[in-house]
Image (cartoon, rainbow, N blue to C red):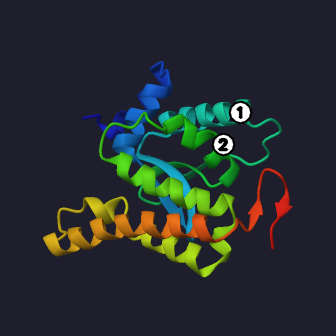
Amino acid sequence: GLNLDHSDKLKECNITINKYWLIGFLEGDGSFSFAHNRPIINLAQKGSNYTMLKIQEYLTDIISNEIPNWTSKVFLSTRKDGCVSVYITDIDALYKVIIPYFNNNLKARKIVDFKIWVISVNIYINGYHFIKEGREIINIISNCINEKRYSTNNTSEELNIINNNIIKINELYNSIINSIKPIFSVFKGINYT
């Protein structure tokens, strides 16, 4: 592996980020997750500021190209332990750019997290996060993706619960979209309530 003490030497490397490089990075060091029950995408790596700055720049460029006059941003933060994170919280960027960007391109285990995380973004886009049923789905999703699903410490009973919850997520979401009108349309500026 990379000796983290030499991370500054990465500046001398010419890192070329493209779609497939980013997908590989996400599969290894990224997550579709939540911050305060709000869907986000997060890419993180310890001791690699230059790489993370290049990812921030790349994501900012692809979002800005797809969403004219985009005023939000791709965030970069460094934790006390030296882990550098690049993350996006903007629902429009997630929905209009990130979902199409990664849709049908993930090949490893992140594909399951992505598919159920997309449901949470759709819940926000349609305003269902304002109702009990939408919040319930988001809570279930946040409790069965990433480390909760991949832990080697999970018992077979816990894994069965997670797998059943994934099925439940799809059933609940289909129930909402088939029985409750969207609360609002983000793109049309229409409030349905």
- Element assignment for label 1: helix
Residue assigned mark 2: 96
**Residue in view at x 41 percent, y 44 percent:** 47
Number of callouts in the render? 2
Q: Check disc 2 and give the amino acid type.
A: Lys
The circle drawn on residue 66 is 1
Answer whether labels 1 and 2 touch (C-beta < 8 Å): yes
Residue 154, percent from left and from top: 19, 69
**Residue in view at x 74 percent, y 49 percent:** 72
Q: Is 182 drawn above or below residue 49 in the view shown? A: below
| Most foreground residue, 84 or 126 | 126
Quarter of image, res 53: top right
Left-right relation of 72 to 40: right
**Residue in view at x 33 percent, y 40 percent:** 4
**Residue in view at x 66 percent, y 42 percent:** 96
Q: Is 137 drawn above or below residue 46 in the view shown? A: below
Residue 63, percent from left and from top: 67, 36
Mark 2 crowd level (few <14, some 14–19, many ≥20, 10 Å Cα): few
Quadrant assignment for the N terminus: top left
- Element assignment for label 2: helix
Question: Alpha-carbon distance for marks 1 and 2?
Answer: 8 Å
